[in-house]
Image (tube, helix red, strand yellow):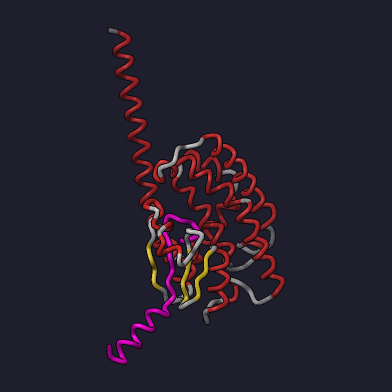
Amino acid sequence: MTKNQEKIQQKEEMKLKVYVDRLSQPSRAILIFLKVNGIEFEEIKMDISKRQHLSPEFKKINPMGQIPAIADGRFNLFESHAILVYLACAFPGVADHWYPADLFRRAKINSVLDWHHSNLRRGAAPYVLNTVLAPVLGLPLNPQAAAEAEKLLSSSLSKIESIWLQGNGKFLVGGLKPSIADLSMVCEIMQLELVDEKDRNRILGPHKRVLQWIEDTKNATRPHFDEVHEVLFRAKTRFQERRLMGASNKTDSSDRAAVRSKM
């Protein structure tokens, strides 16, 4: 191997590697952040439905067997909020509004991130799982778990409006521009694109300020927001087609039963 080839290999080894599945909401948040801020990286695509995140190779990166995760040279890191904080601090050129140097604003963003995992995520993720995703992952649907998750989800959306979106800014904790907390939480809520449209409208419809905040965050991160979410929108179309086929099959079965009852 020539010296030039060695340098190229070393550069590749030191390049930021990002292990993600774009159907994962925290994975999408990290990808959008990287793209918006022009950070060079290599996307290592993982498929949760194929259990690739549980492979021995990946567990060398994240022994917890969860995505997203990153490898920055010899430094490995997992947990999406920790990754976003690291990226905002470690790479030059990232705008201050993402994770402000001001101690008080930074502390408020940290408080939102902590609240997210114990509230919004605990509502949104199990709701989507138990209404749509479970069969794809080889799991049974659990209507009771979905109902309980919806209560926490609705409560969390109300708190976002009444607490985190209070202030003169368009974004969380009064921000005039988005932070890593805005990106993380909006990507969480975007997962609701997978559920039936009437259920999504029922849950999000009453929260006009949340809906506007989602649009503001999309607009602030386009075109990368749309590009990273393409896989989610394709999945949404597939789930809609399945629901329509299921409804059609039920109608056909009902019609056949009605015909038999008259014979």
Q: Is residue 18 above or below residue 154?
A: below
In the rendered structure, the answer to whether residue 18 lies left or right of residue 169 reads left
Which region shows up in magenta?
A: 1-27
Q: Quadrant of the N terminus?
A: bottom left
In the rendered structure, the answer to whether residue 6 lies left or right of residue 98 reads left
Q: Residue at x 60, y 52 (%)?
A: 209
| Residue nearer the viewer, 225 or 67 | 67
Q: Kindly indicate the quadrant of the structure image that contains residue 239.
A: top left
| Residue nearer the viewer, 121 or 221 | 121
Residue 82 location in percent, x, y? 57, 67
Tell whether position 6 is magenta.
yes
Q: Is residue 147 above or below residue 50?
A: above
Q: Quadrant of the C terminus?
A: top left
Q: Kindly indicate the quadrant of the structure image that contains residue 117.
A: bottom right
Residue 137 location in percent, x, y? 41, 46
Residue 113 location in percent, x, y? 62, 61
In the rendered structure, the answer to whether residue 112 lies left or right of residue 72 reads right
